[in-house]
Amino acid sequence: MTQPILQVSNLTKRFGGVAAVSGVSLDVYPKETLAIIGPNGAGKTTFYNMLSGRMIPTEGSIVFEGRDITGLPPHRISRLGVSRSFQINNIFDEMTVRENVEVAVTAYRHEGRRWLNVASRNRGVQEEADELLNRLAMTSLSEKRAGVISYGDKRLVEIAVVLATRPHLVLLDEPTAGMTPDETHRVTSLVKSLAATGDYTFLITEHDMSVVFDVADRILVMHRGQTLVLGEPQEVRAHPEVRRAYLGDTEEEIAS
Ligand SMILES: Nc1ncnc2c1ncn2[C@@H]1O[C@H](COP(=O)(O)OP(=O)(O)OP(=O)(O)O)[C@@H](O)[C@H]1O
């Protein structure tokens, strides 16, 4: 049987009396796309923060590709192949799209402080950046300054920057937040096409249920820091507590 790429056991984070995440256990398998949903305050961000090393769990363990990464600092976890995109833009507006990706590729290659000078001259880096942009169908934007492209395109550049670190596990944090329907469609298509390459495993937090049901192989529903349901989309859709606690209201809303 396939070994999980990520094994989360009894993961717990308490802030004083508040258990933001409480006893969550989860196995994630290579190449799957697993969505994490839940109402505001359910613990999704705290869960991500522990996976990516920004917060140290109060209890529990995180094993990635057979190695215990619990409590390691973010740069070590990233280096091991877990990469996270954020809800905020963190790209350089003054640089072109390609330069942004080159910086990420170069940083990954550990060229240290010389990266700014090296990036534009290093053909290997350029080729890798071009290949990534091609993979994301963004070649036509390569020479544009990041500051002038649309919000949706910026979010895609961020995904390119994340992929430049050659992750095996990609944590996407509300990738379609603030996007137009067209932009949302581009992101869902992209995630699906990247998942289809078999090179990545995705965790994705997302409030847009149509995106979740479109991209996810499985869904973890969190509620008050705990696992409410973990299952395939049709199980989650049909689950009475999920309907009450989160998806809420009507059949049509959930199916849409
Ligand atoms: N640094 C912190 N100190 C104290 N309490 C915190 C801290 N971070 C999160 N919490 C609390 O933990 C709970 C879970 O928060 P978290 O941000 O993880 O939820 P979320 O599911 O990501 O919510 P949202 O969808 O609004 O981003 C909330 O009650 C929140 O107030």
Image (cartoon, grey):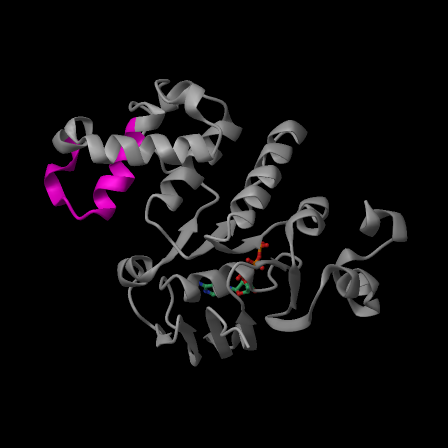
Q: Can residue 172 be seen in this view?
A: yes
Residue pictured at 70% horizontal, 68% vertical: 231
Relative to 231, say whether 144 is above or below.
above
Q: In which quarter of the image is the N terminus?
A: bottom right
Residue 140 on image: x %, y %? 44, 19
Magenta stretch, residue numbers: 99-116
Relative to 249, say whether 221 is above or below.
below
Residue 209 falls inside the magenta stretch: no
Q: Outermost residue, front direction?
A: 1
Residue 77 on image: x %, y %? 32, 63
Of residue 127 and residue 73, the one placed in the foreground of this image is 127
Relative to 89, say whether 42 is above or below.
below
The quadrant holding residue 133 is top left
Residue 204 on image: x %, y %? 56, 53
Say left or right for 207 vs 99.
right
Residue pictured at 62% horizontal, 73% vertical: 226
Label the magenta part by its dominant secondary structure. helix
Q: Is residue 101 visible?
A: no
Q: Outermost residue, right direction?
A: 251
Say left or right for 86 vs 106.
right
Residue 102 on image: x %, y %? 27, 34
Relative to 81, say whether 173 is above or below.
above
Task: Report the label total.
Answer: 0
Residue pictured at 32% horizontal, 57% vertical: 78
Say left or right for 159 vs 253.
left
Of residue 61 and residue 233, the one placed in the foreground of this image is 233
